[in-house]
Image (cartoon, coloured by chain):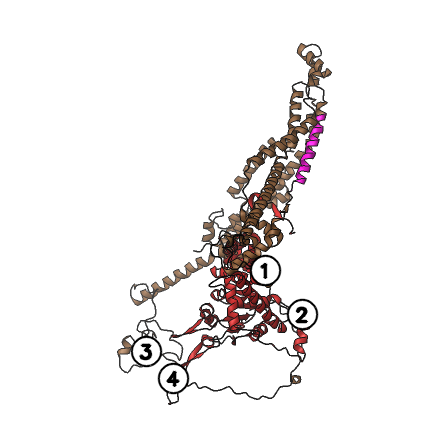
Amino acid sequence: MSSSHPSADAARAEAQQFQKQFEAIRAEVAKMMVGQADVIEGVLTALCAGGHVLLEGVPGLGKTMLVSSLGRAVDLSFSRIQFTPDMMPADVRGTSVLVETEGGGHQLTFEEGPIVANLVLADEINRATPKTQSALLEAMQERQVTVGRKTIKLSEPFCVMATQNPVEQEGTYPLPEAQLDRFLFKLVVGYPAEHEYKTILNRTVGSEEVELRPVSNAEQLIAMRRTVRAVPVPEHAESYAVRLVMATQPKSTYAPTLVNRFVSLGASPRGAQSLLLGAKVRALLAGRFSVSTQDIRAVAKPVLRHRVLLGFEGLSEGVTADQIVDEVLAKLAVPNERSGATGDVALGAAH
Amino acid sequence: MSPDSRSKAPRGLGGDLSTSSTSPRDRLRADLDQISSGAAHTLEDAARRVGLRRELVRALPWLALVPLLHIGLQLLRWMTGGEPRLMSPWAALALGAVVTALWAWLTAGERPTAAVGRRVAIGAVDRQLGLEERLVAADEFLGRRAPTGFERAAIEDAADRSSAARDTQLALAESSLTWRGRAGLVCAAGLTLTLISLWVARLTPRAARPGGATADALVAAGGPLDEVARAAHETPPEAPLEKTPVATPEPRERPRAAEARRAESAADLSDSIKESAGKTGAGRSSGAQSSSAASDSESAPSSKGQESESAQEQPKSAAKTPRRPKPPKDAPPPPEERDEESGATAGKGSSKGSNQNPTASDWQSKDQVTDIDEQDVEADEEVDDDEEEQENRGGVQPSLRDRRPPVSRDLQIGFGNRPNPDANGRGGPSEQKKSRGVASLVLGVPVPDRVKGRPGPGPTKVTQERIEPEAEEAAPRPAATGATRARPVEGLGAPDLDPGLRALVRDYFLGRRNRPRS
């Protein structure tokens, strides 16, 4: 380890182990989940970075199956909460119940809710009311649950993977901004390709059953998270992440016209943290030992799309958050790229 | 290179990166110095070239300006009677090119070239080689006093690639300025001007023209050919004479246009007056209508005055356009003009309003509102009736027009669940103050219960028991028993609005939003 006597060999070994573990989990999940490679990588990235994931997609695309497969591939305590409109916060956090003791008396005992687990699948989270959705706030940010005077520390690794249907659908409640900001990534699950349909049908309609085995555990996952945290961020990459987040805030120095016109609320500092954490995982997967601006650009969309709140005019014009992020990425200058007098000089093709 | 391959080929840097004398760290630093200096030099050269090209584009107009100036000088000289040939037009063109180049070179030299920073230079090589900022990051990590394991690994990773980067020549794709089209235009203009200059140079000097000199001499002498010479100098007078027949049909059309315009304005005026007449006539009583029927004639003095003014103005306008045919005074006006004027300027509508004042005004229309008059009449009749009643009672009593029914003191509870319609909150059957009023102090007066409905069942006891879930067996329902869908599922698309309706809604809300809040 690189804690007391940091050495390059130890770092390389850590990085190698990280890659190996990551690939093993990905391969195991891919046995069940057909296609959706980007989504699988995003989910695993968030798991390794110590963040939570919000999966959005129309019903039937395998969001729930992806998370449950991940729970089986990673040997973690897995809990599933099916959010419904009549659900209450106590159904998530737990509550004190009166239990009859052996002597015939009664005693208040705290009964833990399903949130107390390593991997929590919050299925169709936007079917519950915002009151119930808010029950996750403390757990997601501070890794603890407080009920009355009782505070329960959640065991690491703790990860909430929520799925939601598009907000426009019937019977859904949009997630509050405070909760959206707590998700590291928002991944959009799309329809599979044509050739993937056949594989899906073969696996699901036939008699063949796919068995998933655990290829990792909590200790390994914690070590992976430690490795991610150890990846250094150069100054130029850090400032680029900060400018990227500031560019999503209307009336800021780096905000392009589209942001000033259509965005009412930009990303918070938590967005910059998420950018760097996601970029670190990506750098490790790319075989690098430091973060580059390309890594930040690669994770910008899943990190920022749910942190950009469109204003009335943006909604009426049909502008999406992805378009805003694309515009920000296109307009924001990357550090170490020459501008001004030699702005007309561009690099030729790489040799 | 992946961490896997890196671990297979350890470089022996480990923890002694900072202590080894011939460490790759120093080598990397030297390589990066070389890379940055070379790349910075290349970038600055490229920037200089781009700047010069930009100034060249800006100076391109000189290529046409110099031949133009040459032509101007040639013409000036020719006008003053000199020889128009100053210098060779081709030489002027060449001079323009020289001036263009000189101007661009001087202005580009005056502009300071920004120095390329070390990171920018290394970053350019980084991008060219596709190293994903390994060199830039390593350059930064080299400056840290106590690098972490990952920073050391990043430095070693970059050191592996620095030798290749050092030998790489930075290739820059200088973006093409949009100067080709402009340069082509300017060159064409320069060539054209040169040709014009050539033609001007072939002009004969004015002093050498034979005819002109003889005529001038004759004019100066004032001899018998004076008139002829003047005629030769002056412009021929045919031009104004030729224009006269062309102008003749114009007066015929002008009165028609003027008449049409007058007819239009009269029609507009008549419409507006008709409208006002309609408004004023809306509340007329039948008597007013009948009495004003006699004044429907064209004898309104104000309108007549206007008519006579217009009649007086017509000869003036006719005097301004002399060729306009003057209509006879006795001739009656055209029928359509008469019809329009009859409603517009003759004041028919205005005189309909009242028999007191023939002119239309708002005051009249207010006076003519029938229902108000009728209300006044009815009110007067009521007052008269009251006075008659008071006189019958034996004297004049205070006016009882504002009298109200007395406060009801009925203490009944109400009309079922409905509130008492006579509730006034003044100690009467008011639900709000009944319990606090005098009635609540009186024994035996029933105070209504405010809680409607059945009383609560009392406290309930809820006990929770731990019960293990038990599986319940249910008979499977065969799928065949389910009914088939009668019709296909319809489209489930989002109910988007039409573009027009959507824009309308958007404009409405934007307008509401932009409106200042009171």
First in residue order: circle 1 vs circle 3: 3
The overriding secondary structure of the stretch rendered in magenta is helix
Rendering colour (chain A): red
* Residue type of the residue flagged with mark 2: Glu
Have a look at marks 2 and 1 and say if they share a chain. Answer: no
First in residue order: circle 2 vs circle 4: 4
* Residue type of the residue flagged with mark 1: Leu
Residue at the disc numbered 3: B411
What is the CA distance from the residue labelled 4 to the residue labelled 3?
56 Å
What is the CA distance from the residue labelled 1 to the residue labelled 3?
59 Å
Q: Depth check: A49 or B378 in front?
A: A49
Which of label 2 and label 1 is nearer to you?
2
Tag on residue A262?
none
Tell me which corner region of the image, top left, top right, bottom left or bottom right, holds residue B89: top right
Would residue B89 be seen by someone viewing this image from the given angle? Answer: yes
Residue drawn at (60%, 51%) of the image: B163
Which chain is mark 4 on?
Answer: A
Instruction: Measuring from the top left, give residue B398's x and y in whole percent.
Output: 30, 63
Residue at the disc numbered 2: A196
What stretch of residues is rendered in magenta? B178-198
Vertical relation: B306 (above or below) A30 = above
Q: Secondary structure at mark 4?
A: strand
Have a look at marks 1 and 3 and say if they share a chain. Answer: yes
Residue drawn at (30%, 76%) of the image: B435
Which chain is mark 2 on?
Answer: A
What is the CA distance from the residue labelled 2 to the residue labelled 1?
40 Å
Which of the image's four quarters has the N terminus of chain B?
bottom right
Tag on residue A107?
4
* Residue type of the residue flagged with mark 4: Gln
Instruction: Measuring from the top left, give residue B300's x and y in whole percent.
Output: 52, 44
* Residue type of the residue flagged with mark 3: Leu
- The stretch drawn in magenta includes residue B183: yes
